[in-house]
Image: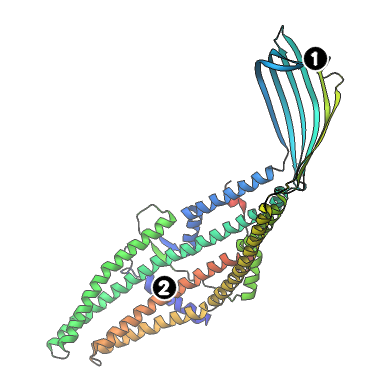
C-alpha cells in the first residue's frame, strides 16, 4: 500500500503543481510546508506573542523565588525637625509638658529572610540615631543598636508561603508546557494557511484545465451541430459550460490572491511576489496506540498540570477560610545590644543587652456565622472544582483517543483519495474521447465526469491537509512526537529573556 501511494504521489504532484501554464505567475518562491512552519516559528505574530506570554510567567516565577532570598534594605531620616510641647518625666517621677526643639537623624540597615515552611520572618538590624536638643542650648546625644536579631512567627494563621511553594513551581512548569503547545498550534495554523493557498492554486489549475476542455468541446460541438449530429440544446449547454469556465478563472485568481495574502500576513512576509507551494511528499505512515497517547498526554501536557493546580488552589482556599478570622496569634522575639553616649565612640562602648518578647493574639467572640459561611462556601467551591476537573479529564482523554483513531485512518484515506483522483481523471479522458468520436451524445455524462475528476483532485489535497494537521494536533495534545518517538523538549534558550 505504501509503494502504491508513493507512486501516486509522485505521479500527481508534477502534473498539478509544476505545470508552467497553470502556475506561470507563481514560480518565484517555491515553499514547502516545513519551511513555512519554520518561518512562522521565527517571525509570526503568534510566535512572538507566545514568547512574551512565557516571559511574563518566567518573571512571575523569578519574583516568587526572590521573595525567599535574603533582602537587604536601608532606611533613614535626615533630618526630622520637631518644635512642640512634649511630655517630660523628671527624675523624681513627676511629669510635665515642656516646649522642646530638637533635630533627629536616623539610619538603619535591615537583613530579612522569610521562612516559608513556618511562615515566619527572621531579621538582622543595625542602626544609629542622633538627637540634637535645641531647647536651651544645643545638646547632642547618640543611640546605637549595633546588632539586633529578631524573629516573628504567626501562630494558627494561614501560611500563604507554604501553598505558594507548591503552586508556583507547578504554574511555571505549566507555562513551559503551554509554550510548547503554542508552538505546535503555530504548526497547525501554518498548515491551514498553507493548504488554503495550495487548494486555491489547485482550484485555479482545475479552472484553467476546464476552460481549455470547454473551449475545445464547444468548438467541436459547433461543427457537429452544423452537420446535424447533436441537438441545439447540447450546443447551448456546452456554450454555457464554456462561459462558466471563463468566470471560474476570474474567481479562482481572486481566491489565490486572497489565500496568498492570508499566508503572507500570518508569516509576516512583506514582499509582494508570488510563490508556488510544494506539497509534503515525505509521508512516513505510522500507527499510534491510543492508550499510549493518553498516557503521554497525562504526563506531559499543560492540561494535566492545570488539573493539579486547580485542585491544589481549591484546597488552599479551604485552608485559608478555616484559618483566617479565627484565633490568631503572633510571637515576636528580639535580642541584641544597645548603648547611648554624647558621641559616636561612646555610643558603641560596652553596649548593653536588649531583649523584647511579645505575644499578641486575637480571639473572635461572636461573628454571627461569618467564618462558618466562608468555610462552607470554600468547601462547596472545592467540590465544584473537583467535579469539573473529573469531567474535563474524561473529555480530555476521550478527545485524544478519538483524534488518534482518526489519525490512524489517514493512510488508507489518503491512498483512496490518490487512487480516486487517478481513476476519475482517466474516466473523464475516456468519456471525453467517446464524446468526441460520437459514441455518446449525452452532455450530462460528460459534465458528470468532469465534476467527478474535479472533486477527486480536491479531495486528495483535503486528505493530505487532514493528515498533516492531525499529525501536529496530536503533537500538541501529547507533547510527544510519535513519528520520531521522542518527547518534545522545552529549551529556554529558544526564548531571549
Q: Residue 237 carries which label?
A: none
Question: SS at mark 1?
Answer: loop
Q: In this view, does 445 lie above or below 295?
A: below
CA gap between label 2 and label 1 equals 106 Å
- Badge number at residue 90: 1
Q: Position of residue 446 (x, y in %)?
A: 28, 85
Residue that lies at the very extreme toward the left in this rendered image: 226
Residue on which disc 2 sits = 13
Which of the colour schemes (rainbow, by chain, secondary structure, one colour) is used?
A: rainbow
Q: In this view, does 141 lie to the left or right of 185?
A: right
**Are there few (<14), some (14-19), or many (20+) residues within 10 Å of tag 2?**
some
In this rendered view, identify the residue nearer to me: 101 or 302: 101
Q: Nearer the viewer, residue 419 or 300?
A: 300
Residue drawn at 47 percent across, 78 percent down: 414
Identify the residue shown where x is 29% and y is 72%. 208
Q: What element carries label 2?
A: helix
Asked if residue 377 is positioned above or below residue 351 in the image, the reply reads: below
Let me know if residue 454 appears in the view.
yes
Mark 1 neighbour class, 10 Å CA radius: few under 14, some 14 to 19, many 20 or more: few
Q: In this view, does 36 lie above or below 161?
A: below
Find residue 118 and report its horizontal and vertical position in percent.
77, 47
Location of residue 15 in the rendering, given as x and y in whole percent from the top left corner: 37, 74
> In this rendering, does residue 26 appear at all?
no
Q: Which of the two discs, 2 and 1, labels the residue nearer the N terminus? A: 2
Q: In this view, does 145 lie above or below 214?
A: above
Q: Nearer the viewer, mark 2 or mark 1?
A: 1
Q: Where is residue 36 in the image (x, y as percent from the top left)?
A: 46, 60
Amino acid at each position: 500500500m505504501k509503494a502504491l501511494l508513493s507512486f501516486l504521489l509522485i505521479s500527481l504532484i508534477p502534473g498539478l503543481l509544476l505545470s508552467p501554464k497553470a502556475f506561470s505567475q507563481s514560480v518565484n518562491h517555491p515553499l514547502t510546508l516545513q519551511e513555512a512552519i519554520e518561518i512562522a516559528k521565527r517571525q509570526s505574530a503568534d510566535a512572538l506573542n507566545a514568547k512574551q506570554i512565557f516571559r511574563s510567567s518566567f518573571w512571575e516565577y523569578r519574583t516568587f523565588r526572590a521573595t525567599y532570598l535574603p533582602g537587604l534594605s536601608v532606611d533613614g531620616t535626615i533630618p526630622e525637625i520637631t518644635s512642640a510641647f512634649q511630655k517630660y518625666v523628671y527624675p523624681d517621677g513627676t511629669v510635665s509638658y515642656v516646649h522642646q526643639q530638637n533635630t533627629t537623624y536616623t539610619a538603619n540597615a535591615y537583613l530579612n529572610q522569610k521562612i516559608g515552611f513556618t511562615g515566619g520572618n527572621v531579621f538582622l538590624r543595625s542602626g544609629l540615631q542622633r538627637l540634637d536638643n535645641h531647647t536651651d542650648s544645643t545638646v547632642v546625644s547618640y543611640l546605637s543598636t549595633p546588632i539586633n536579631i529578631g524573629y516573628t512567627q504567626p501562630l494558627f494563621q494561614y501560611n500563604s508561603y507554604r501553598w505558594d511553594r507548591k503552586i508556583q513551581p507547578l504554574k511555571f512548569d505549566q507555562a513551559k508546557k503551554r509554550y510548547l503547545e503554542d508552538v505546535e498550534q503555530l504548526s497547525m495554523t501554518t498548515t491551514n494557511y498553507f493548504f488554503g493557498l495550495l487548494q486555491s492554486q489547485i482550484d485555479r489549475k482545475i479552472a484553467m484545465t476546464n476552460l481549455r476542455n470547454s473551449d475545445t468541446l464547444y468548438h467541436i460541438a459547433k461543427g457537429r451541430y452544423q452537420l446535424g449530429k447533436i441537438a441545439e440544446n447540447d450546443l447551448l449547454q456546452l456554450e454555457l459550460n464554456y462561459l462558466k469556465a471563463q468566470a471560474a478563472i476570474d474567481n479562482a485568481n481572486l481566491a489565490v490572491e486572497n489565500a496568498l495574502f492570508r499566508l503572507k500576513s500570518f508569516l509576516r512576509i512583506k514582499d509582494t511576489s508570488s510563490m508556488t507551494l510544494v506539497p509534503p511528499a515525505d509521508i512516513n505512515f505510522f500507527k499510534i496506540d491510543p492508550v499510549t497517547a493518553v498516557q503521554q498526554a497525562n504526563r506531559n501536557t499543560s492540561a494535566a498540570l492545570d488539573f493539579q493546580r486547580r485542585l491544589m488552589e481549591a484546597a488552599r482556599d479551604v485552608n485559608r477560610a478555616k484559618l483566617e478570622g479565627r484565633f490568631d496569634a503572633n510571637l515576636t522575639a528580639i535580642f541584641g545590644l544597645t548603648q547611648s553616649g554624647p558621641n559616636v565612640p561612646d555610643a558603641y562602648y560596652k553596649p548593653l543587652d536588649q531583649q523584647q518578647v511579645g505575644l499578641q493574639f486575637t480571639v473572635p467572640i461572636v461573628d454571627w456565622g461569618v467564618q462558618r459561611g466562608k468555610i462552607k462556601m470554600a468547601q462547596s467551591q472545592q467540590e465544584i472544582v473537583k467535579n469539573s476537573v473529573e469531567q474535563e479529564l474524561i473529555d480530555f482523554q476521550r478527545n485524544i483517543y478519538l483524534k488518534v483513531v482518526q489519525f490512524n485512518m489517514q493512510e488508507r484515506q489518503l491512498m483512496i483519495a490518490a487512487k480516486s483522483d487517478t481513476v476519475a481523471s482517466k474516466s473523464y479522458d475516456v468519456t471525453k474521447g467517446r464524446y468526441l468520436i460520437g459514441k455518446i451524445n449525452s452532455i450530462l455524462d460528460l459534465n458528470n465526469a468532469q465534476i467527478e475528476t474535479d472533486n477527486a483532485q480536491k479531495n486528495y489535497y483535503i486528505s493530505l491537509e487532514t493528515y498533516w494537521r492531525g499529525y501536529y494536533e496530536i503533537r500538541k495534545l501529547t507533547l510527544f512526537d510519535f513519528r520520531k518517538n521522542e518527547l518534545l523538549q522545552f529549551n529556554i534558550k529558544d526564548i531571549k529573556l
